[in-house]
Amino acid sequence: MSALEDTWVLRGVAPLGGDPTDVLVADGRIAALGADVATRDATVVDGHGLVALPGLVDLHTHLREPGREDAETVATGTLAAALGGYTAVHAMANTSPTADTAGVVEQVWRLGHDAGWCDVHPVGAVSVGLAGTQLAELAAMAHSAARVRVFSDDGQCVHDPVLMRRALEYVKSFDGVVAQHAQEPRLTAGAQMHEGIVSAQVGLAGWPAVAEEAIIARDVLLAEHVGSRLHVLHVSTAGSVDLIRWAKSRGIAVTAEATPHHLMLTDELARTYDPLYKVNPPLRTAEDAEALREGLADGTIDTVGTDHAPHTREDKDCEWAAGAFGMLGLETALAVVQTLMVDTGRMTWADVARVMSFAPARIGRIDDGPMAQGRPLAVGEPANLVLVDPAARWTVEPERLASLSRNTPYGGIELSGRVVATFLRGRPTVLDGRPVAREGATR
Ligand SMILES: NC(=O)N[C@@H](CC(=O)O)C(=O)O
Ligand SMILES: [Zn+2]
Ligand SMILES: [Zn+2]
């Protein structure tokens, strides 16, 4: 690569929404910050009016490869991630075969590396085949080339308390974390949507809030008992936020995630009977969504995770009960967060960097070493950056998304904030809102 290609000046950008400055990117790192940095041999990006954030990190992405390459591949999902401002994603283990061995996690890691859009950190399954009975080879995955630190049966709840306890104990030896999909299976058998007034009116089987809250209550106590790290995925109820607030006040090592869709959307959408709005956990009430926004703003909720869950048309263009659970998220997450939290004055851009980059990188233990993510925008740090135009307003058009699937719940909705550029260790993956393929990358 010539100097021209790997030296960049980002003119007049606002790091974390602060005072405008120039950023010099050279040799994959932030080489200088300040007014009028040298431009010789550099490509200049006019960044006036743009906010610079550390590259976003998702702790909760479904890439569907191996097994469901008709819904998403590592290449298409990570392209969607780059366009959404992400420089790293954690790929959930509910693939086919399950990512429950060193071999499968290394395969996913390598596919991500070869595609080159962003770093892919595989999540390892907690139990063999996500079956919830036998512990998977956690240490082998941790010590593989993929260096797995996050373990989850996401899609399924680790409902056996003994298995959950063993997993929490086991991951301590390599500073891992168990990420729980909190869903009591007996209380949610056959459930289709949130249990409440709307489910009664539309006649769909309900998924009660207590089915989530009971597992969170149990798991924070288990995490306290064994002195291990617990991460709660896709928190969806006001009661869950209260439980996590309580656990944190006791000093329990729990972190929690909210998804963009649980922050923005409610169970009223089930009245459409369109399975586009069918997701696990289900969209809840307006009061629950407000409690999540409050918890995100006050730090009870640590991260926004997309739970990007691509599904094919065949799995979504059907009646509600037959539809698959899940919705897309990578290309819209930052705009949803800006629209709900920044434009309303509830969060600053520094807060956005915290919940979408610093905290998820720290939880996943990828904030260290040459591949470090979620680092401050400072001289010497790896140049993982996203430039956002906060003044842009756009209407989500499902057909224009890079994901192989089309199941976004935001089609036709106007959001604010567009990703203009994404840099992965000094190399642009997105410029002018369009993908920039790396030479020799797989497609
Ligand atoms: N969220 C969903 O509704 N679906 C996810 C699984 C999960 O995150 O539980 C999927 O893999 O499709
Ligand atoms: Zn889940
Ligand atoms: Zn998920």
Image: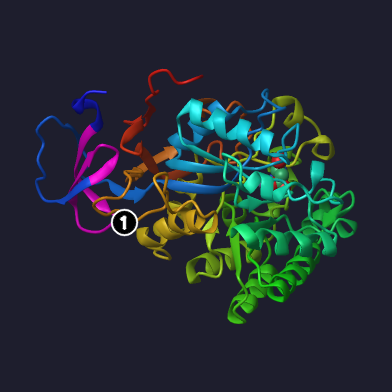
Judge from the rendering whether residue 170 lies leftward or rightward of residue 78; answer left or right. right
Quarter of the image with the N terminus in it: top left
Q: Residue furthest bottom?
A: 250
Residue in the foreground of this view, choosing between 435 and 318: 435
Instruction: Check residue 315 for magenta coloring.
Output: no
Residue identified by numbered label 1: 16
Residue in the foreground of this view, choosing between 394 and 4: 4
Residue 276, quarter of the rendered image: top right
Q: Please indicate, yes or no, whether residue 398 appears anywhere in the rendered image.
A: no
Q: Please indicate, yes or no, whether residue 112 appears anywhere in the rendered image.
A: yes
Image height of 398 relative to 52, above or below:
above
Residue plotted at (54% across, 26% down): 75
Q: How is the image coloured?
A: rainbow
Image height of 242 relative to 331, above or below:
below
Could you tell me residue 22's position as x and y percent?
17, 47
Tell me the crowding category of disc 1: few under 14, some 14 to 19, or many 20 or more residues within 10 angstroms, Cα based: many
Judge from the rendering whether residue 148 lies leftward or rightward of residue 383; answer left or right. right
Could you tell me residue 177's position as x and y percent?
63, 58
What secondary structure is the stretch in magenta mostly built from?
A: strand
Could you tell me residue 317's position as x and y percent?
74, 29
Residue plotted at (26% across, 37% down): 27
The amino acid beneath tag 1 is Leu
Residue 424, quarter of the rendered image: top left
Q: Which residues are magenta?
A: 7-30
Residue plotted at (52% across, 65% down): 296
Where disc 1 sits, the SS reads loop
